[in-house]
Amino acid sequence: MKELKNVEVFLFDLDGTLNMGENPIEGAMDTLRILDQKGKKVFFVTNNSSKSKYDYLKKIQRLGYNADISQIVTSGMAAASYINKHYKNKTVFCLGTETLKKELSEDGINIVDIGQKSDIMLLAFDTELTYKKLWNATNLVADGSIYIATHPDYVCPSDNGNMPDAGAYIACVEATTGKRPEIIIGKPYAPMAEYVFDFCNVTPDKVAFVGDRLYTDIKFAINNKMTSILVLSGETTLEDYKASKLDVDYVFDNVNSLRNI
Ligand SMILES: [Mg+2]
């Protein structure tokens, strides 16, 4: 655990930490500006692979913080980097949104369509899911394509109830094929951490992760040797935290406690 005044880089989750859907958590955008003024570096790290970094840039700006594209990391970006590093020039069928597929293509990933053979089946948070896409994905996994998932979250909070997220799709693919992903990229796993440290040009001892979800955000911090900061403004209650037995460095009601470091 680091004294927070010595932390140089603050990584923030979004939903439940800085915002609830389209609404910022009260004071959160001012808190980001205060951290800027203190000379801290701020980045946004989301597992949500249904949107591109450009979508997230617009979203954070709508919430009221003048973010730059260089502050945004998504599990989709980390997945592209991972595939380029370990499976250069392999073909990829992506169970994902059009905006994600466009971003992957821009990063040099060779995306194939339904019905084509594919070396890799990349499962993402596909909010444009069709039965044909799902069936194609399970066929590829059953036939031995390398199975990668962008992130493990079961649900994505929204203003209209929890949305089934990539983790729920992983369960569906497992029920159909008996197979789990060989690699999961996003929080809490190492590929996302390696990507983030590289992206932010920092070592974990100088980093704190701020998030509201125990099984992704907090485990991400703990497993990858960052300082962990749990905020109770999202899905985790104090009772959940106590029951988890996780050794969290700091627990705050919301991000505004970071103003006083
Ligand atoms: Mg969250």
Image: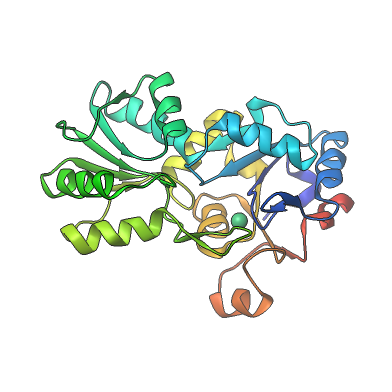
Residue 214 image-quadrant placement? bottom right
Number of marks present in the image shown: 0
Describe residue 44's horizontal placement relative to residue 137 as left or right: right
* Relative height, residue 98 to residue 257 (above, below): above
Name the residue nearer the viewer: 154 or 87. Answer: 154
* Relative height, residue 199 to residue 204 (above, below): above
Residue 59 image-quadrant placement? top right
Name the residue nearer the viewer: 235 or 78. Answer: 235
What is the x, y in percent for residue 230?
A: 67, 61
Q: Residue at x 62, y 36 (%)?
A: 56
Q: Quadrant of ligand 1?
A: bottom right
Q: Quadrant of the N terminus?
A: bottom right
Describe residue 116's horizontal placement relative to residue 168 as left or right: left
Residue 242 image-quadrant placement? bottom right
The colour scheme applied to this rendered structure is rainbow
* Relative height, residue 258 to residue 59 (above, below): below
What is the x, y in percent for residue 193?
A: 50, 42
* Relative height, residue 133 to residue 152 (above, below): above
What is the x, y in percent for residue 25?
A: 78, 55
Residue situated furthest left in the rendering? 143
Name the residue nearer the viewer: 209 or 151. Answer: 151
Q: Residue at x 65, y 32 (%)?
A: 57
What is the x, y in percent for residue 85?
A: 34, 26
Describe residue 131's horizontal placement relative to residue 168 as left or right: left
Q: Residue at x 21, y 49 (%)?
A: 135
